Amino acid sequence: MSAAVKPASASMSDAEWQARCDLAALYRVVEYLGWTDLLETHMTVRVPGEPGAFLINNYGDMFDEITASSLVKMDIEGRVLGGGTKYNAAGFTIHSGIYKACPDVACIMHSHTRAGAGISVLRQGLRPISQDALHVLDDVVYHEYGIPTSEEECIALGQSAQKGGSLILLNHGLLSAGQSIPAALYRLYMLERACEVEMIARSMDEAPVLIEPHIVERAARRQSTMRRQPEYGVRQWEALRRRIDRDGADYKR
């Protein structure tokens, strides 16, 4: 496995270069998990030491083509500061709005999977019918569909993210926000799983078994505590990163 070494010519901090390598790895993980939608979703990370700046994919690159140096550095006002030059305008709206409203958020992930998009057409799509759902139910926020690139939507997304870090964007897809890449990734993984199980249950001719309310309440308390821990999602992130590295993913350049 190659080391994440910043090129000598790169005019950036070591912390930014490491964040670039981590985000490029995250895109490879998303591709490995099958969460891609051609070019139309986006993951970002806040630049360490620069709370007003974040990294996003260069629009047009497939996820398995993304590298540390190809990522676009932007500020939350929409100015490109370095790296690539093209970005998804709707992606900027989504991510900048949340970063502005939630200073503790360091990573945001957005997906258009079939299960996530399917559940997003239901106003209260997730029910307490699986242990996967119990991981996220207390953290889920249903966000009304808005005009993708508008200032109003930017503000509204920030307000929704202040209520929880597992967002179901109605008529759209899913979004997770976390204090680190591992936290955002694990949140989104469990939200995706919950949506997959919900979709399967809704395709059957029998009503699902609902988990007892007192168990749902206890699970909510436990998950809320776990999400506040710095190690939340770290084991899963490290395991997935080892998996893509074994495949020889060349993203640290």
Image: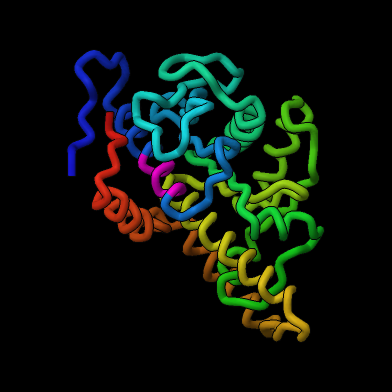
The quarter of the picture where residue 213 lies is bottom right
Quadrant of the drawing holding the N terminus: top left
The quarter of the picture where residue 221 lies is bottom right
Residue 214 image offset from top left, x and y in percent: 66, 82
Left or right relative to 246: residue 167: right
The quarter of the picture where residue 231 lies is bottom left
* Vertical side of 139 occupied by 206: above or below: below
Which residue lies at the image location 34% right of the left edge and 30% below the top edge?
68
* Vertical side of 222 occupied by 104: above or below: above
Which residue lies at the image location 57% right of the left edge and 76% below the top edge?
131
Residue 81 image offset from top left, x and y in percent: 47, 14
Which residue lies at the image location 33% right of the left edge and 60% below the top edge?
235
Left or right relative to 138: residue 29: left
Label the magenta part by its dominant secondary structure: helix
- Any magenta on residue 29? yes
* Vertical side of 2 occupied by 185: above or below: below
Residue 208 image offset from top left, x and y in percent: 72, 83
- In depth, the one of 76 and 116 nearer the eye is 116
Q: How is the image coloured?
A: rainbow
Quadrant of the drawing holding the C terminus: top left
What span is in magenta? 25-31
- Any magenta on residue 80? no
Residue 178 image offset from top left, x and y in percent: 51, 47
The mark total stands at 0
Which residue lies at the image location 58% right of the left edge and 23% below the top edge?
76
Left or right relative to 169: residue 190: left
